[in-house]
Structures are given as structure tokens and as C-alpha cells.
Image (cartoon, helix red, strand yellow):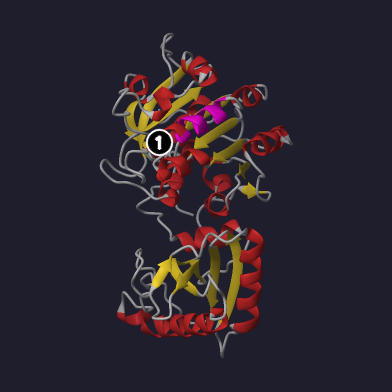
Amino acid sequence: MEITFPDSLTEAQGGRIVLLVMDGLGGLPHEQTGLTELESAHTPNLDRLAGRAALGLHQPVRAGVAPGSGPGHLSLFGYDPVRYNIGRGVLSALGVDFPLQPGDIAIRLNFATIDAAGRITDRRAGRPSDDENRRLVAKLRAGVPGSGDLQVFFDSEKEHRAVLVLRGPGLSAALADTDPQATGVPPLPATATEPGAEPTARLLQQVLDRAFEVLADEPKANALLARGIDAYHAFPTFQERYRLHARAIAKYPMYRGVARLVGMETQGASADDQDSVHRLAQNFTDYDFHFVHFKAVDSRGEDGDFAAKVKAIEAVDALVPQVEALAPDVLIVTGDHSTPARLRAHSWHAVPIMIVSPWTRPQADATFGERPCARGELGIFPGMDIMTLALAHARRLAKYGA
């Protein structure tokens, strides 16, 4: 394994770290109040912690780049999201505990609805229930076999999302999505983005064609859209890089997937945010690093619902005392990217962060919001430096140089 900075400085002993991630935390000011969602929220617990924390804003990828959830989390975990970027299909497969092997091609699927002319009318097939999703996946497993050296695997993810894995010799992941990201048009054909991937594109199209036949009698989920296509390869782990025994707690499979990619332990889906905090308390001292993910903040931002995003932030704030009661040596609260309700999408804006430990230079009157964070001691810095700061505050980094 290649040793990268600061990996060579890490020490096996030190404090315990908790990373709380409110997905899509950053926002933009409301046109009437001039306050962001975080600044508008009633967050007495986070504000109290801010008064003894190091505050700042982090850029998940680069200035001006709006990250996806995968790159945003890889940055939080200290992996350069440009160098280590990987397709959503791999993260989805890992998130549902599919036993990927090196060279597998993992594809994230959307169940979708097409009309008699083959045009997409609903890219999410009416958002089927998880039980309905599992029924549809079982139907695909029974009706879409592999052929020759090609093995075909379907797995259920959540609601309208599923996973397709292709396994066989000579496969390439240099394939374009078949999801046109629009309605009123047909799905795109499987297309190679490099000449060497053309045989794999033909195989994928054959699999999708057969899947469409199997789903043809479904009233809503009668089509599949392929997205996030990539080949699986192992990443250096938290244990190898940081000497940390780490675990992830999350409701949604994708976030457990990106955590598994870097060697964190996962233990199934949380039922809700309260259950996530309950799981955190279980076997807390068995781990050096805990990643806890809260999704609703991002979802409400993508809905464009400013007030609902405020409430989602307040719901997490109410859980903070339970986390404090576990007495982590370092507590970090941040997001993987910004999702302003005004934009209804991920954005390039820097993300608020607080680091609570005994080794900060606090602003006694600070609160947790974008503008107080901009004035904090951390300033605006690259997101992939968060793990270095976490290790430093946990006293897990040796001095550099003589």
C-alpha cells in the first residue's frame, strides 16, 4: 500500500473520535430573513458546543465544484475525491452487502415507468415500497440469467433503487449511463465511452433488453435505468492508513457502502435517527472511530423546502446530548456538501464544521452557522484535511520531522 501523508505519522493509541454528518448541511440565506437553514434553526445544543469548538468551513472537492455524495464522503474520510472517485454502483453494491470481487462491474439501477412508445414517464416508478422493490428484484433474478462466462446478479437497495452486478472475464466499466435524466424520451442505449468497452456495452444491453421483457407486464416498474457504472477495486482502509478500528451507522445503503469501501464495519440499516444514536451507544468503546449519518437534512434541501430542512437540523440537534453523554474525545459535526433549499440541489458552497475537543481555541460567543464558522480558527480549508485534524485532536499523530 502506498503511504500518503499523514498516514506515516499515525499512532495506534489515542482518543476516540465521533463524526456526525448531516448530509447536505450547508445552505444559502433565506430571501426574507437573510439567514441560512442552519442559522435559522433553533439548535441550543450545537450552539453550546460551538462556544468551545474549533469552527470553520470546508470545501469537499475543490472551490466551485458541487460534489456528489460519494466524493463528499470520501473527502470527509481523508481520501482525495478526485484521485479516489468511484461510481455510485459500487457504493450501492457495498451498501447492500453484496460480496463484490475485483473486476466486478457494479451498476445502480432505477426502476422506471415507460409508456407504450417506450418513453419515460416516471424515472422512479412511483417510488415503490421496499417490499415491492424486493418482489421486482426477485422477478429479475428469476428471469434474467447470465450466459456463457457472464454472471448476472440483481440485488435490492431501497424504494426505486436496485443494483446490477456483472461478473466475467474482460469486462470494462467504461460505459455511459442509460438514464437520460429526463422524461418524455426513451432510455439511452448502453454505450461504450472507450473502444475497448464495446463488448461489455453489448452484454449490458442484452441484460437490459431481457429485463425489460421480464418487467413488461408491470403497471409502473416496467423499465430500468442504469447509472453510476464502475468496476470494483479495493481501497486502502482506515486500519491501514490511520490505525483506527472504525464503524459506520447509517439508514441508507449508499452511505454504508462508501464506509465499507474504506474498511469501516457496518451493521445493517438504522430504523431512524434515534436508532442511529442508540446504535452508537452500543459497544461504543469497542471502536476508535464512529461515523454517524443523518440523511433528512439533504432530502429536504433537495425538495426545496427551507422550513423542513430547518426542522431536520433541529431534530439532529435534539440528539446531540445523547452523543455527548458517551464522552468522545473528539466530536466533529459537519456535512458532506451543501444542499441549499433555494437551489434544490447539491452546491459548491463550503460546508460548516465544528471540532469539539480539549485542544481548541474557542470563540466564547460563537454559534453554529455559516457566518460564525467563516470567522472560526479553521477558516476555509480542504475537506480531505478533516481526518488529519481529527487525528491531531485525538492525539494520534506523531510530530513531523526532527
Q: Which residues are magenta?
A: 308-317
- From what the image shows, is residue 74 above or below residue 297? below
Residue 182: % across, % down: 34, 64
Q: Amino acid at mark 1?
A: Asp
Residue 279: % across, % down: 70, 38
Furthest-bottom residue in this view: 148
Image quarter (top left, top right, bottom left or bottom right) of the C terminus: top left
- From what the image shows, is residue 355 above or below residue 364? below
Q: Main secondary structure of the magenta part?
A: helix
Q: Quadrant of residue 146?
A: bottom right
For image coordinates 41% across by 45% down, the residue present is 302
Q: Nearer the viewer, residue 371 or 151?
A: 371
Tell me the SS state at disc 1. Answer: helix
Q: Nearer the viewer, residue 221 or 369?
A: 221
For image coordinates 53% across by 70% down, the residue present is 220
Question: Is 309 in the magenta?
Answer: yes
Left or right: 250 as drawn, with respect to 205: right
Question: Is 158 in the magenta?
Answer: no
Residue 93: % across, % down: 56, 62
Q: Report which residue position mark 1 lands on.
A: 385
Q: Quadrant of residue 271?
A: top right
Q: Residues within 10 Å of mark 1 (few under 14, many from 20)?
A: some
Left or right: 355 as drawn, with respect to 347: right
Q: Nearer the viewer, residue 98 or 223?
A: 223
- From what the image shows, is residue 320 above or below residue 170? above
Q: Is residue 43 visible?
A: yes
Furthest-left residue in this view: 64
Q: Is residue 170 visible?
A: no
For image coordinates 53% across by 76% down, the residue present is 166
Furthest-right residue in this view: 283
